[in-house]
Image (tube, rainbow, N blue to C red):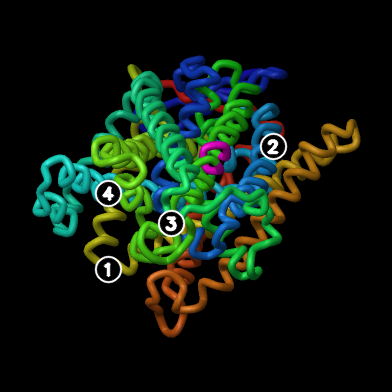
């Protein structure tokens, strides 16, 4: 049986196809991404080189030589949640991912808030990535020209924001043109990142093993022991940073309706991306630690003066002045690549929410030529630009605190999605050991770990010393921002409940509802 429901605006039509086993797409460009392309999108969204340069220092400062162990510990809950995503995608290959799956498992309101968490987390990350790309752009120009004045342009707030908005506009334009344009850019940028990392690791290990460096350390297997961290507080602080380093791999799943073999390929691509990421992180952490040590002076990874950009301090000593520039290029490429691919999950989540009537219908329109969610992509770009510009001119502390609040959003929607997997498949858990583990035990364990981090982070955020150190009525600004953004989601949800009561009554999207086709 086929049911056609007209919807308001520009002649858009939503077609619900209920034939057994048929789950059509929403007008996206199907079969345009393969296994490798999907994995590259996941790696790019995570931005490995940028994550490493910004978190090696803080993590080493928290846990010392146990940094590789903490990276492994952060990988574990992400791997367990990745199994949940893989199983859900096999059953429901829908670009709405977390939103669609949690609606079908827990109902419209929990699902809507899960989708909101993903969208807000992505907007924060996009604004941060644009800012990082801008900073490294001027840093690289300064290195190439030898001009301190060029480097100092990054500190000029109007110039910085204008450049940042230009980066956002370019990334939006590339994403707007669909998956074909996205893939070509990403292969080059991700390839560059991994190649430069490989050179850095090889040169750092070679110099560290020469014995000529006073701060260098000999490798020890004890570095991989998480129980050797000096305190639980230090471990949780390092774990929170580690979890952030893996965020974004689920972009592989949000392009599932555009991927060859949409039921299986995205899940495999996510696991492949995570394997590449954890391998890159461990090798780089070990190499950097062997070369520079974890001291708090000079090039030591624990030096607070270089913690925000470790590669800037290590580029010259490890790779020399000529090759060192490549590390700056790699960080810029990492931020720029992630800025572009991070538009994919937010645009496709908004597309799905609109197609299922959880957001205004105009966001469900697909560009007739590029087969991309054009309006959703442009809306995400505008929201990112406005958010970053407003936060930048409002207060530097507020901008920093929004980044700290990001971890709360990540744990929020990942944990709900993991629990949704176990509940969605609850009737199948007794069929086999495999089903019990991959559809039940692993997702619940991963969700519980992330929920614990969510709770601990929420508790710590109340302290005004958390983040930038600013406070509102004695409560930490990070807590106010994090909880405030979730409460904004509740308000928007209540507004949409009045505009689209059918969705919130559970009449549009249920466990048995097939995907929707949006036709121009």
Q: Secondary structure at mark 3?
A: loop
Mark positioned earlier in the residue sequence (1 or 2) = 2
First of labels 3, 1 by sequence position: 3
N-terminal-most mark, 2 or 4 = 2
Quadrant in the rendering for residue 173: top left
Magenta-colored stretch includes residue 219: no
**430 and 190: which one is in front?**
190
Q: Secondary structure at mark 4?
A: helix
Left or right position of 340 against 209: left
Locate the C terminus by quadrant. Answer: top left
Mark 1 closeness class: few <14, some 14–19, many ≥20 residues within 10 Å: few
Residue range in magenta is 278-282
What residue is drawn where x is 51% and y is 71%?
Answer: 461
Q: 58 and 127: which one is in front?
A: 58
Is any part of residue 91 visible from this angle? yes
**Residue under numbered circle 2:** 83
Residue annotated with mark 3: 214
Residue occupied by mark 4: 385
Whether residue 279 is in magenta: the answer is yes
Q: Quadrant of residue 80?
A: top right
Q: Residues within 10 Å of mark 2 (few under 14, many from 20)?
A: many
Query: x, y (%) of residue 425?
Result: 78, 38
Q: Where residue 264 sits: x, y (%)?
A: 65, 22
Inter-mark Cα distance, 1 to 2: 40 Å
Verify CB contact (< 8 Å) between mark 1 and mark 2.
no
Residue at image coords 9%, 53% = 149
């Amino acid at each position: 049986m086929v049911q056609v429901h007209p919807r308001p605006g520009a002649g858009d039509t939503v077609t619900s196809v209920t034939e057994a086993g048929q789950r059509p797409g929403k007008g996206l460009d199907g079969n345009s991404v393969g296994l490798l392309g999907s994995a590259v999108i996941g790696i790019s969204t995570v931005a490995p080189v940028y994550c490493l340069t910004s978190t090696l220092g803080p993590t080493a400062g928290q846990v010392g030589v146990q940094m590789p162990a903490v990276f492994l510990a952060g990988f574990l809950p992400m791997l367990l949640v990745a199994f949940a995503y893989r199983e859900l995608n096999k059953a429901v290959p829908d670009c709405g991912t977390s939103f669609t799956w949690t609606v079908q498992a827990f109902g419209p309101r929990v699902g809507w808030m899960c989708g909101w968490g993903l969208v807000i987390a992505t907007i924060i990350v996009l604004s941060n990535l644009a800012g990082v790309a801008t900073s490294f752009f001027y840093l690289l120009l300064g290195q190439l020209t030898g001009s301190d004045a060029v480097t100092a342009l990054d500190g000029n707030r109007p110039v910085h924001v204008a450049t940042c908005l230009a980066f956002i506009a370019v990334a939006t334009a590339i994403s707007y043109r669909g998956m074909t344009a996205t893939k070509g850019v990403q292969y080059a940028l991700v390839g560059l990142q991994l190649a430069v990392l490989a050179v850095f690791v090889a040169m750092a290990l070679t110099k560290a093993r020469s014995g000529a460096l006073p701060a260098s350390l000999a490798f020890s297997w004890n570095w991989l022991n998480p129980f050797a961290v000096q305190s639980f507080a230090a471990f949780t602080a390092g774990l929170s940073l580690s979890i952030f380093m893996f965020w974004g791999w689920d972009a592989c799943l949000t392009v599932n309706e555009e991927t060859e073999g949409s039921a299986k390929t995205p899940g495999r691509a996510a696991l492949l991306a995570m394997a590449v990421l954890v391998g890159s992180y461990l090798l780089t952490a070990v190499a950097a630690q062997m070369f520079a040590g974890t001291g708090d002076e000079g090039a030591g990874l624990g030096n607070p003066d270089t913690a925000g950009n470790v590669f800037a301090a290590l580029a010259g000593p490890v790779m020399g002045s000529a090759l060192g520039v490549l590390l700056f290029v790699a960080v810029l490429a990492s931020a720029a690549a992630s800025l572009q691919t991070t538009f994919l999950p937010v645009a496709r989540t908004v597309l799905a929410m609109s197609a299922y009537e959880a957001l205004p219908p105009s966001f469900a329109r697909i560009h007739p030529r590029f087969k991309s969610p054009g309006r959703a992509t442009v809306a995400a770009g505008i929201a990112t630009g406005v958010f970053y510009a407003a936060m930048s001119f409002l207060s530097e502390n507020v901008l920093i605190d929004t980044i700290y609040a990001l971890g709360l959003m990540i744990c929020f929607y990942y944990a709900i999605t993991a629990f949704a997997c176990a509940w969605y498949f609850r009737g199948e858990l007794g069929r086999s050991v495999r089903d019990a583990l991959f559809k039940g035990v692993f997702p619940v364990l991963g969700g519980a770990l992330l929920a614990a981090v969510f709770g601990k982070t929420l508790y710590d955020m109340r302290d005004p010393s958390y983040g930038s150190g600013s406070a509102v009525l004695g409560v930490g600004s990070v807590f106010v921002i994090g909880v405030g953004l979730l409460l904004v989601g509740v308000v928007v949800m209540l507004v949409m409940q009045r505009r689209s009561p059918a969705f919130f009554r559970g009449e549009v999207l249920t466990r048995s509802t097939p995907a929707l086709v949006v036709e121009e």
